Amino acid sequence: YCGTTITGLSFLSSSIMRLVHKDDKTLIANILLKPKSLYILKNIARFHFTHEILKDQESYFNNLHIPRNRRLSIICRNMPLDPTAV
């Protein structure tokens, strides 16, 4: 339903984005998204990893709890290169 790139701009609360490899679930990256941060998922990160924003009780970065409050984000996705792709 979207193309090669996902871009997000985060506002308000800090949050943790977790990337998990689709085939090897032991490959995990936790990314701290501070307010006003921009992230871009493309290439390997886009197609070989799932992504999610962690709930407050799971939001730890370098063993430090990152309180998750109200979060606002602007997400941009480009169209698929193949117009018949869903």
Image: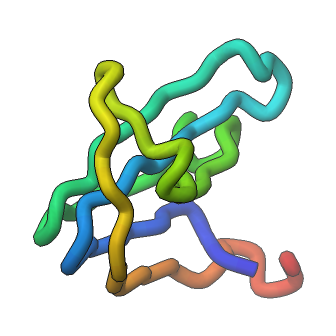
In the image: residue 12, left or right of residue 6: left
Q: How is the image coloured?
A: rainbow
Query: Residue 85's quadrant in the figure?
Result: bottom right
**Above/below status of 51 relative to 71:** above
Q: Nearer the viewer, residue 1 or 56?
A: 56
**Above/below status of 62 relative to 65:** above
Image position, residue 16 (x, y; %): 40, 48
Residue at position x 27%, y 54% from top?
33
In the image: residue 34, left or right of residue 78: left
Image position, residue 12 (x, y; %): 20, 78
Which quadrant holds the N terminus? bottom right
**Above/below status of 29 relative to 34:** above
Image position, residue 14 (x, y; %): 25, 60
Q: Nearer the viewer, residue 38 or 84?
A: 38
In the image: residue 82, left or right of residue 47: right
**Above/below status of 76 relative to 51:** below
Question: How many numbered circles does the render carry?
Answer: 0
Residue at position x 44%, y 45% from top?
59
Q: Nearer the viewer, residue 77 or 31?
A: 31
Which quadrant holds the C terminus? bottom right
Image position, residue 65 (x, y; %): 33, 38
Query: Farthest residue in the left direction?
Result: 36
